[in-house]
Image (cartoon, grey):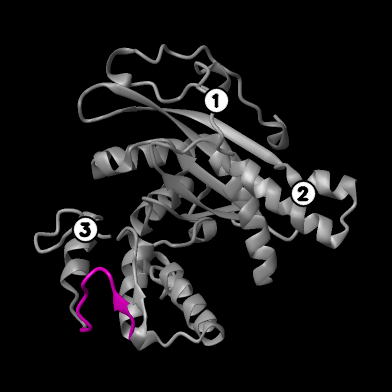
Amino acid sequence: MNEDAIATVDQPASPASAPGGLDRSPRAANRAPKAMTAELTNFEIVSHYFDLAADRLGMEPDLRAVLRSAYREVQVQIPVRCLDGKIHVYSGYRVQHNGARGPYKGGVRYHEEVDLDEVRALAALMTWKTAIAGIPFGGAKGGINCPAEQLSKEELQRITRSFIDKIEKVLGPTRDIPAPDVNTNAQVMAWMMDQYGKLHGYTPAIVTGKPISLGGSLGREEATGRGIVYLFREAARSLGLRPEETRVVVQGFGNVGSWAARLFCQLGCKARRRLRRSRRDPIADWHRPRGTARSYPAGGKAA
């Protein structure tokens, strides 16, 4: 079978009222029509700004057509028996937008609202990001519409390994390299690396963001949050902002938010979430093993 001709076949969707809401995999085309809203989809927003940039560059229509759409879009069914004894069905997505500059590169997110439109938009943004950064990669993105925060570690591992089993033919160190994203971390990357290795042999380069002990990079965990702080530091010079006189509000306290908050404090800013400027951060200590700061006993709601 030609790997570059992989396709999916739409299956009849289960009724939305199915007992327990176990099937989260129906294709968008099979879902009941939703009320019309004035909101644009994620991909429509990305396409709008792409068109603005293409107009400024005077890009020819034929080249614009190539860059506007994805090279490959894969959607797979992920049936997993969870700890409640029932089989839950999720959808997994991997969109490879453009690989002209090198292997596809992009994260995999786990969130119940993930859909093909969102992943398609994020894959396009990865193409532009790697090109602007001047690194030899293309753009891709992936996701699974599972409620990661409600699942156990064992359930997440089953979902992850099943996902890799179904998309491994379009992955590889010289083809497409996944990475962490929303609700995924070094542990999830380790599962992906291990599952891919079962099929192709030991291949540590199949993912980035893996644990240091498995060949991961020092500084990867805090890199995205650090990038936010670097952007603020450079913009502050032009805006006349002094860090010690600036108050920063951080929405969320996941990997990006927690590191950004800590690094803003190190820069001298006042964080809306109360953090100590010391080597031990009580909120971070609470967050690390739980993956959330919502139940921190001394905390409050962020403004």
Residue type at mark 3: give it.
Answer: Ala
Q: Mark 3 points at which residue?
A: 293
Which span of residues is magenta-colored? 267-278
Q: Distance between the residues labelled 1 and 2?
A: 28 Å
What x and y, as percent, mark residue 283?
A: 19, 67
* Residue 100 appearing in the image: no
Say whether residue 276 is left or right of residue 134.
left
Residue at the (42%, 37%) spot, across then down: 113
Circle nearer the N terminus (1, 3): 1
Cα separation, mark 3 vs mark 2, equals 40 Å
Residue pictured at 21% horizontal, 72% vertical: 274
Residue lying at the far left in this picture: please name it. Answer: 297
Depth order, front residue of 46/162: 46
The location of residue 32, given as percent across then percent down, is 50, 16
SS assignment at label 3: loop
Which residue is nearer to you in this view: 128 or 235? 235
Residue 128 seen from this side: yes
Cβ atoms at labels 1 and 3 below 8 Å apart: no
Quadrant assignment for the C terminus: bottom left
Disc count in the image? Answer: 3
Q: What residue is rendered at 34% in x and 76% in y?
A: 247
